[in-house]
Image (spheres, grey):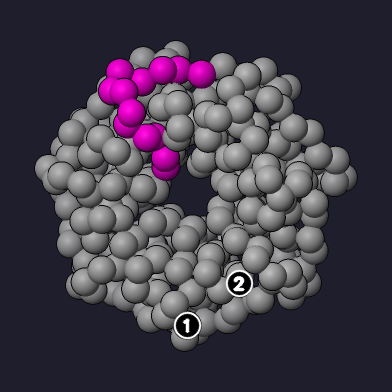
Amino acid sequence: MTMERIVVADGAAGPYGITAGPDGALWFTLVHAGEVGRLAADGTVTRYGLGAPGCGPSVITAGPDGALWFTRMRDHRIGRITVDGEARCHALPTGDCGPYGIAADPDGALWFTQLNADRIGRITVDGEVSEYPLPVTGGFPSMITAGPDGALWFTLNQAHAIGRITVDGDITLHPLPTGGAAPVGIARGGEALWFVEIGAGQVGRIGVDGEVTEHPLPDRAARPHAVAAGPDGRLWFTEWAAGRIGSLAPDGGYTGYPLPVEGAEPHGITVTPDGAVYAALEIGEIVRLEP
């Protein structure tokens, strides 16, 4: 496994979310600078200001319309940027809702979580917003992903549960076996959903039937934050407190890759179709791991 560090900003800008774009580049958010960045295959970095330095762009995903969509956590909007760098945003009906996780769905819309409002939102590519209240108070819905069953699956960080919402808005919650699990990241891996428990130092799997399996990490204090599945069935996740990228093989075997810099604070992670792993480090870098 080789590791490459790529400087994309100064440490004050705060690289946070990251995803592979439809143009073959990596797109990432700069949560403190209020910008979205693009890392081209040749290493060229381009940064796009959003006209609101304090907007807090957080999680980013490729949309069904060929653009990139992202949450603006601090000014409570959903942003969209084309691969040419043209950006716009959509205000949300619920004020102070704190949009955070976002994912595209096969129905052609984007679904997002609202940290502060106990709601899941849906936005069409035309900007039409629908909101669905959760049957819990103070649950802190965090990341969200499209599942293999045509529904959306999300983490409830403070309710210590995994949620499922259909495209019609029907919601089911699955409490986790471990108290204080505090799940954050979630991703589809094969025919199941995989998530990381920042509070318990575990990787979890939940089937579409709601059955949960948990895998304790060797370092229970690592605080795993985001997770992505590779094309070979291997899981990759950021260990925020440990300054490490973790990996879980299909048989449950764990491998850790320490980052070669102190205080790296790895957050978002993505895997490209060729199996390369990219993680956003809040110190101003993107790290690339290649098998």
The residue carrying pointer 2 sits among few (fewer than 14), some (14 to 19) or many (20 or more) residues within 10 Å by Cα, namely many
Residue 146 x/y as whole percent: 38, 45
Q: Is residue 75 above or below residue 62?
A: above
Q: Is residue 88 above or below residue 59?
A: above
Residue 232 x/y as whole percent: 57, 67
Mark nearer the N terminus (1 vs 2): 1
Can you say which quadrant of the picture contains the N terminus?
bottom right
**SS at mark 1?**
loop
Q: Residue at x 63, y 19 (%)?
A: 51
Q: Is residue 65 magenta?
A: no
Location of mark 2 (residue)? 244
Q: Which residues are magenta?
A: 89-101
Q: Is residue 21 above or below residue 154?
A: above
Identify residue type, mark 2: Arg
The residue carrying pointer 1 sits among few (fewer than 14), some (14 to 19) or many (20 or more) residues within 10 Å by Cα, namely some
On screen, residue 26 versus residue 2, left or right, reads left
Residue 52 x/y as whole percent: 58, 22
Q: Is residue 90 magenta?
A: yes
Q: Residue at x 37, y 35 (%)?
A: 98
Mark number, residue 219: 1
- Nearest the viewer among 114 and 289 is 114
Q: Identify the image quadrant of residue 159.
A: bottom left
**SS at mark 2?**
strand
Q: Residue at x 67, y 18 (%)?
A: 86
Can you say which quadrant of the picture contains the C terminus?
bottom right
Q: Are marks 1 and 2 in contact (CB under 8 Å)?
A: yes
- Nearest the viewer among 90 and 76 is 76
- Nearest the viewer among 9 and 42 is 9
Q: Which residue, as the protein is rendered here, is positioned at the far left?
A: 135
